[in-house]
Amino acid sequence: MISRRQWLQALGLSLGASAHSSAVLAITAAGQENQQPSSSGQRLDLTDYEPKSMLQVRETRVERARFPVVDIHTHISFSAKSENGIELAPERNYLGAPDELLAVMERKNLRAMVNLTGGFDNGLVGAVTKYDKAFPGRFYTFTEPSYSKFLEPNYPRLQADAIERAHGAGARGLKILKTLGLYLRENITSGKLVKIDDPRFDPMWDACGQLNMPVAIHVSDPIAFFTPTDRFNERYEELNNHPDWSFYGHDFPSNAELLEARNRVFARHPKTQFVVLHVGNFAENLANVSENLDRFSNMFVDIGARIGELGRQPRTSRKFFDRYQDRILFGTDATPHGDEFPQQVFNDKLYEIYFRFLETGDEYFDYAPAKVPPQGRWRIYGIELPEPILHKVYNQNAARQLRITI
């Protein structure tokens, strides 16, 4: 069994790590002149700080979702060969065995899991065979671009044809990792970054539209990942633990530039449905996400790995869900054995937190099953969705995208 850490190491997501060495400092050094010792006379390092809330508030455990759930955003497999963030081989490694996954699914009322990273060519065929065909209706697999062929002169047509073959092999959609825009380069792993709206991908987007295959697209990360990793960064601990997650500096585009390029793709391909993962890649700014949803009728969003953001703005989030109730899909970014990433590790506790956020009005609770909040030191509040909206988010919206019956 291969862990999430090994997956990321295999992808080579260590770009720019040296640039952050100066930012990886002890929190006691930042503002040291104002730091006061504890009652015991000893200074406490932030990494050892695990405060216990003194609030006396309701705690609701939601063990099963109120309606059957389609998790549109999971990662069960990944490429067996990668370099500098680019998948170079169709062969897949698997993070979870079907029986292991099904046991959790039965307990939590998960009707289906969508494995977004199903790969391409024979790797895709293997993933579809192992999960989708072996357990009909419980697993659905998306394909991915074959970037290893990017330098071939007829790549645009090759990639469009690959989408058609993937559809015939059972792929339900296309997954775009942030490889496009942040890792793929003109010489695949070197040279100038390739932009999201590069016209060489136009035939691929069109093929997805013609075949009614939704595109699950991830082009950016939390806005804090594009700012200096310093004492003002609210995700300092997360970036300190994972300096390769930062896209500040070097030749990386800004978050705004990435979203603008993405939007140009949406405008050029109105017949293709795009599910923008992680709440449109801007959960910190729901006004921006709303503006884009209003602008592009072919845009949808999922909530994967972002209830930490949604839950700290519960009133705004509740209005957002009410307004876009037909265009929000349930997703978690769940990864089996991703224990070092508790905001998305596949287990019972993860799903119970999502259900609690969506179904209850509970206040001030953890957004991930971890002793220390992994994305930022805050807690969240439930938004207590009414049943009609909850039903849509849990399965109906995904069913329309996947063209399945729940």
Image (cartoon, rainbow, N blue to C red):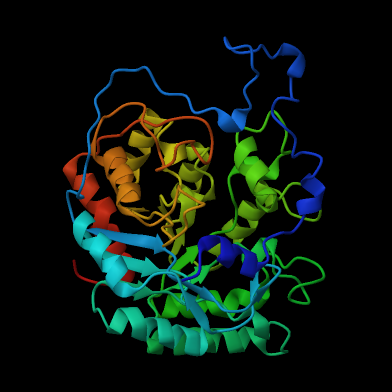
Counting labels gives 0
For the C terminus, which image quadrant? bottom left
From the top left corner, tell me how far across and down residue 6 is, in percent: 58, 65
From the top left corner, tell me how far across and down residue 328 is, in percent: 35, 51
Residue at (54% x, 27% y) in the render = 49
Is residue 170 visible from the viewing direction of this image?
no
Vertical placement of residue 196 versus 284, above or below: below
Question: Is 381 positioned to the left or the right of 106 in the image?
Answer: right
Is residue 171 visible from the viewing direction of this image?
yes
Question: Is 105 positioned to the left or the right of 308 in the image?
Answer: left
From the top left corner, tell me how far across and down residue 137 is, in percent: 23, 74
Question: Is 174 positioned to the left or the right of 396 in the image?
Answer: right
Toward which corner of the image does residue 395 lie, by quadrant? bottom left
Residue at (73% x, 33% y) in the render = 230
From the top left corner, tell me how far across and down residue 359 is, in percent: 24, 40
Residue at (63% x, 83% y) in the render = 156
Toward which corner of the image does residue 202 lie, by quadrant? bottom right
